[in-house]
Image (cartoon, rainbow, N blue to C red):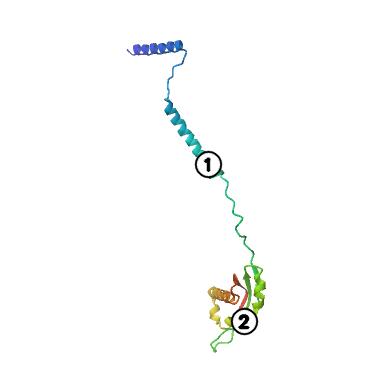
Amino acid sequence: MADAKAAAIDNEADVDADAEAASGQPKKKFALPPLKFLAIGGVAALLIAGGGAGAYFTLLKPKPEPKSDAPLVKPAVFVDLPEIMVNLSSTGAERTQYLRIKVVLELPEQKMVEQIQPIMPRVIDTFQTYLRELRSSDLDGSAGLYRLKEELTRRVNASISPSRINAVLFKEIVVQ
């Protein structure tokens, strides 16, 4: 029986081949309807376009350059003040202690030097008045020096108002 089925299949293949040869056109074994072909082609085109766009935006897209309108950072200007030596406040039972300090003012721009020079005696007077009221315990540790720096900066800015300095910098601090 198996031989009979195999012979029947071979006969059908021969009949199909004879019909193909007679018509002159090869028989299609697998044919897609035109809409399915267009749908598959459209999906493939979208996948390729999406992959290309993704690669462009992640790898090849040029980075925007920083705006040239942004102001450039100006270098700071430093002004040395003369050395200041004051005796510190004491309760009387202690021996007298002295504070010697060298200070530099950090200014934001060069034109402020001309503004500060005429009022420098006022700045030095403000420093001496404040420093004479300090006790040696006020200068203990880094927190004490930080408070001193902030207070001197505040007093200079009050003296030269409306102008402002960036900071008061210590070159030397000696407590004897």
User: What x and y, as percent, mark residue 3?
Assistant: 35, 12
Q: Earlier in the sequence, mark 2 or mark 1?
A: 1
Give the spatial CA distance, label 2 vs label 1: 67 Å
Give the answer, above or below, for where 119 lies relative to 25.
below
Q: Relative to residue 72, is residue 3 depicted above or below? A: above
Q: Secondary structure at mark 2?
A: helix
Image quadrant in which the N terminus is located: top left
SS category of the residue bearing label 1: helix
Q: x%, y% of residue 106?
A: 62, 70
Looking at the image, residue 109 lies above or below residue 8:
below
**Image vertical order of residue 168 relative to residue 23, above or below:** below
Name the residue rendered at 47%, 36% in the picture.
46
Q: Quadrant of the C terminus?
A: bottom right
The residue pinned by badge 1 equals 55
**Res 61 → quadrant:** top right
Q: Amino acid at mark 1?
A: Ala
Is any part of residue 156 visible from this angle? yes
Q: Which residue is mark 2?
A: 125
Q: Which picture quadrant has residue 89? A: bottom right
Pointer 1: residues within 10 angstroms few (<14), some, or many (20+)?
Answer: few
Q: Nearer the viewer, residue 49 or 137?
A: 49
Amino acid at the residue labelled 2: Asp
